[in-house]
Amino acid sequence: MTIDWQSLLVTSTAEIVRKRRIPDDTGAGVLWSVNPQEVLELSALEVMAWEGHEDKPDGPRFEWVGFNLLCNAAPTSFVLDDERFLSVDSFHEALKFPEDTPGRAECALAPSVEARRLACRLRQATFKYRGQVIPVQSADHQGLLAAAISAKIAQNPDVQDALGETGMARLIFPLTFSSQPGALARATPLSLMIERWKRFLSPVKNPE
């Protein structure tokens, strides 16, 4: 499959992900380095493990700064479709609640761990977003998550700086709990690398 990279510069990241314009494992030399050793895992487990503890160790590894801001759990507030979300994780979990309910609103502004707790018993094959019924794990689901990630980047300069500092490293999502990646695990690395390419790596910079 030949990719028209120039046309992707003027296509939203959400649309690229939703329509699968970049097939799996395609992008070396453009979105990420051809060097297989240049890999960064999108994990902030040390921050999350020590968050709220009085005896938390010092240092950026244990704070929501720098590279850790790229994690979906990072409290990097953003607005999507006139609604505010505390993090990408909060957005992901809030989608499990019925639209226009107090539960979704509460989850949207809850920290990552609390958002997961609130939604832990909700399991549906579909969810509603702005009136549209979207199958869980579908291309539309991934595209919506990509829109949230793009909004987070666009609205948080510190996140933009952290993304730029990753250079050409291939970003990967840790499969901590499952060998089968879900919609968020599939959408996150690709969305981040597309945004990085548009903002920092392409000869024609075109941030959305």
Image: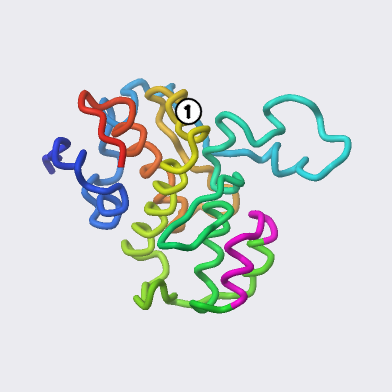
Looking at the image, residue 135 lies above or below residue 137: below
Does residue 41 appear to the left or right of 131 in the view shown?
Answer: right
What residue is drawn where x is 31% and y is 53%? 14
- Secondary structure, mark 1, is helix
> Can you say whether 115 is above or below 16 in the image?
below
Q: Which residues are magenta?
A: 102-114
Q: How many marks?
A: 1
Residue designated by label 1 = 161
Magenta-colored stretch includes residue 113: yes
Magenta stretch contains residue 110: yes
Q: Considering the image in quadrants, where does the N terminus appear?
A: top left
- Magenta span: chief secondary structure: helix
State the image coordinates of residue 77 (x, y, percent, origin top left). Answer: 55, 49
Q: Which quarter of the figure is the C terminus placed in? A: top left
Three-letter code, disc 1: Asp
Residue at x 52% of width, y 38% of height: 70
Name of the residue lying farthest toward the right? 55
